[in-house]
Image (cartoon, helix red, strand yellow):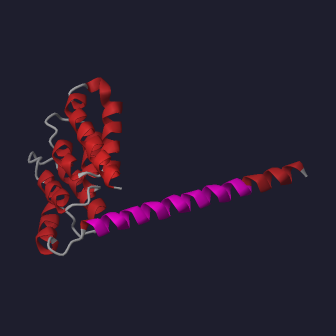
Amino acid sequence: PRTLDAERKHAARSLAARLKPLADKEDDREELMKVIAALHDLAQESTIKALLDSKNEEDRDVRQARAMAVANVPTKEAIERLIQYGYKDRRGAGRTRDIAVKALRYATGEQLKGGGIEVWRKWWSENEKSFDPVAAADARKGKRAAAADKAAKREERKKRQKEKRDRKKKE
């Protein structure tokens, strides 16, 4: 387990170093998204800065993937950086704020009423000390596993129904 953790950290650092060169090349968007997805799955605190420090104007999907990768890191720093990220775009378009709010919902499991970035900042100031990011990450994993199980059961049910229809057609 200790070696695995060290390998995960090393892999995350290596992938994070690839972000800027990939982001600077418009023709490498697919590889960029794969790197971001891998960083999401590795969920290492050392990648937060690299994920959120994109200087160029990437498309919304890339910015959303970056924020969601940060949201999957089970640390309080990730929450703080996402709130800061929500204030990044001050031009009034709100795109970055919307992305940050979605990522904060994912990270915390909270669905705040009127959930703008200001509401999240207030929530965080009230809950930072008691919030357990590891428990939130475990809850996310549990929900994803339950959703995957439900989808697998649904597919199995569809398969059985199709087989039943096919048998009836043959009769």
- Identify which residue, 169 or 23, lies in the foreground: 23
Instruction: Say if residue 60 shows up in the picture.
Output: no
Magenta span main SS: helix
Q: Quadrant of residue 14?
A: top left
Residue 44 appears at what percent x and percent y?
25, 51
- Identify which residue, 8 or 48, lies in the foreground: 8
Examine the structure image and report whether residue 150 is included in the region drawn in magenta: yes
- Identify which residue, 165 or 80, lies in the foreground: 80
Which residue: 51% across, 58% down? 148
Residue 39 appears at what percent x and percent y?
30, 45
- In the image: residue 49, left or right of residue 113: left
Q: How many marks?
A: 0
Q: Does 132 sit above or below residue 97?
A: below
- In the image: residue 150, left or right of residue 82: right
Q: Does 54 sit above or below residue 113?
A: above
Which residue: 42% across, 65% down? 142
Which residue: 11% across, 53% down? 87
Name the quarter where the N terminus is drawn: bottom left
Residue 120 appears at what percent x and percent y?
17, 65
Q: Quadrant of residue 55?
A: top left
Residue 119 appears at what percent x and percent y?
15, 67
Magenta part of the protein: which range? 134-161
Instruction: Say if residue 156 shows up in the picture.
Output: yes
Which residue: 31% across, 27% down? 28
The residue at the far right in this view is: 171
Examine the structure image and report whether residue 51 is included in the region drawn in magenta: no
Q: Does 110 sit above or below residue 9?
A: below
Q: Quadrant of residue 77?
A: bottom left
